[in-house]
Amino acid sequence: MLTQTYIKYLKIDFFTFDLQDMLSGKIGIKGAIRKKRFRNRELLKCKECDLVNECRKPVLPSLGLSNVVIVGEAPGFEEDKSGEGFIGKAGDLLWTETERFDYYRQDFHVTNINKCFPKISRTPTKEQVDVCSKWFVEELKELKSRVILSLGANAYYFFTGNESGITTVSGKIEWVEKVPAWVCYCVHPAWVLRDRKSNMKKFRDSLKEFFNLVERMGGIE
């Protein structure tokens, strides 16, 4: 279980953390949770992989009240149609479950690793993840996010290089140096919808770990 001491400055929008125990002296985090917005419209011009030929247009990130990030794999049909991430059945499930913890969509920076709907491919290839993830990296650099919920196998691949195993690591939290941030891996809500009875507990347990992390980092005001 993570430990921390932190100083909360009243009416100032950042937190200062002493993470010596957590990071073995590697790094201290200033501004772990704060209000920060980022939305790069240059993304709409991207033609660096062939997924752009399958979608209507790349889906921009949804701005949130904090720099805490929820990242999925790629837009689906409804997201492609509306231009907004995590709507439709999978999105409804995600936001219904976050509300159980008294957090809401507008609290988070919502985005995907791949920005284009893989209408034909169905699932982005690892090569397409590698190409498109530069946009996500740019988001993180600007946001200076230190807390991320990673949903699904392709997001897990981006952070770890592992091409499988999301169901076995769902709920795990680790420091990912290349980001750098604390990342909580979680099965994708679309996976839960395939068999709610069997899959919901793993999803809820993983979200619980994530929101425990958010609370330990000071929460979102």
Image (cartoon, helix red, strand yellow):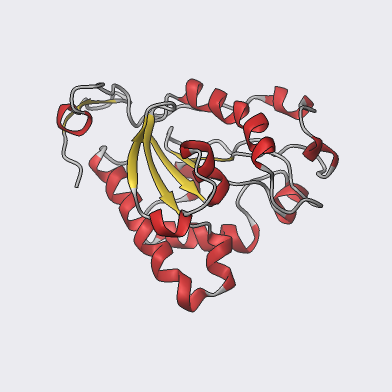
- Residue at 43% across / 32% down in the picture? 67
Residue 74: x percent and y percent?
A: 65, 46
Q: Residue at x 31, y 43 (%)?
A: 214
Q: Is residue 221 visible?
A: no
Query: Which quarter of the figure is the C terminus placed in?
Result: top left
Q: Nearer the viewer, residue 171 or 130?
A: 130
Residue at 78% x, 40% y is: 51
- What is the tally of numbered marks visible in this picture? 0
Of residues 87 and 20, the one nearer the viewer is 20
In the displayed structure image, the side of residue 159 where residue 92 appears, left or right: right
Instruction: Please identify the quarter of the rendering in which residue 33 is found.
Output: top left
- Residue 76 pos. (x, y %): 70, 53
Q: Is residue 105 left or right of residue 8?
A: right
Image side of residue 12 versus residue 123, left or right = left
Q: In the displayed image of the protein, which residue is found farthest to the right?
A: 53
Q: Is residue 32 visible?
A: yes
Is 193 placed above or below 113 here? below
- Res 127 quadrant in image: top right
Where is 183 relative to 142, above or below? below
Asked whether 167 or 46 is in front, the reply is 167
Give left or right: position of 101 versus 136.
left
Percent coordinates x, y for residue 136 in the rendering: 57, 30
* Quarter of the view holding residue 98: bottom left
Instruction: Name the spot of residue 29 as percent of width and height, x first.
Output: 28, 23
Is residue 137 shown above or below 102? above
